[in-house]
Image: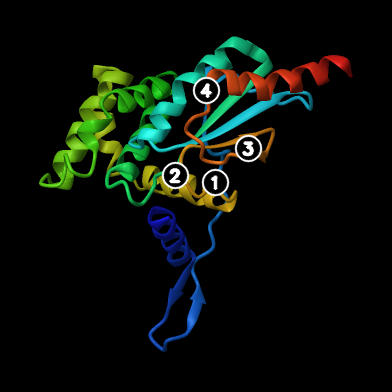
Amino acid sequence: MAALHTLLTFIFFSFVVLDHSGRFVNAQALIPPARFDGFVYKNRLSTGMDSIIIEAFLDPVCPDSRDSWPPLKRAVDYYGSRVSLVVHPFALPYHDNAFVSSRALHIANKLNASATYDLLELFFKRQEVFYSRATFNMSKATIVSQIVNLATTAVGNSYQSAVASGFTDRKTDLMTRVSFKYGCSRGVFGAPFFFVNGFALPNGTDSTMDYAKWRSIIDPLLKEQDME
């Protein structure tokens, strides 16, 4: 509950500010991005009315996000083109390096979209390196340098300077903020958080969603489509 309270407080002060006279004023409105937020898995996005689209809001340095990924990936791979997956990076404010790691995903996606999920899985595999306690005595520059090296492993050595410069590009900063605010606009309050065809799953941030559970959700939807 403490973590949830922290996030809700953060969201509140992201959209409302207090001016010098003590009055509450609205923060600057978020301008819609040029493209839909998120990373399409295997560049396979069905847009037909009978498609099934899963949206997952994940934090690259969140243990629950990490644990939820293998069964979700397995289920999506099982259904092939009948199910599409879009992952939205959702940087939880109580994970110290969530924002910079989410930003790295945007940078990687911009440079080499096919490597975005490779980087996400690298974050999951080496997650403990970027936990708050592990980086407590490190400077921000050192942490960014480590993440640049990790991202370069995913996108390719020839992109190392481009990855590094991505962290000084205002656009990647804004894209990462948009991802977080987009999640908030959908009612996301933690990670992992899942939507199927635009509707939030009842269990919300349940990290125990195993392969069998995903099958139990998707199979009936496909059967209903086949009967139409």
Indicate which disc residue 175 carries. Answer: 2
Q: Secondary structure at mark 2?
A: helix
Q: Earlier in the sequence, mark 4 or mark 3?
A: 3
**Which residue carries the number 1 mark?**
33
Whether label 2 touches label 1, CB < 8 Å: yes
- Determine the CA span between mark 4 and mark 2: 30 Å
Q: Secondary structure at mark 3?
A: loop
Residue corresponding to mark 3: 201
Instruction: Say whether disc 3 or disc 2 marks the residue closer to the N-terminus.
Output: 2
Q: Against 182, is 45 above or below? A: above
Label 3 sits on what residue type? Leu
Query: Mark 2 belongs to which amino acid?
Result: Met
Q: Dot 4: few (<14), some (14–19), or many (≥20) neighbours within 10 Å?
A: some
| Label 2 packing within 10 angstroms: few (<14), some (14-19), many (20+) | some
- In terms of image quadrants, where is residue 20? bottom left
Residue sitting at 46 percent across and 48 percent down?
A: 180
Question: Circle 4 is placed at which residue position?
Answer: 210
> Along the horizontal axis of the image, is 186 left or right of 6?
right
* Element under disc 4: loop
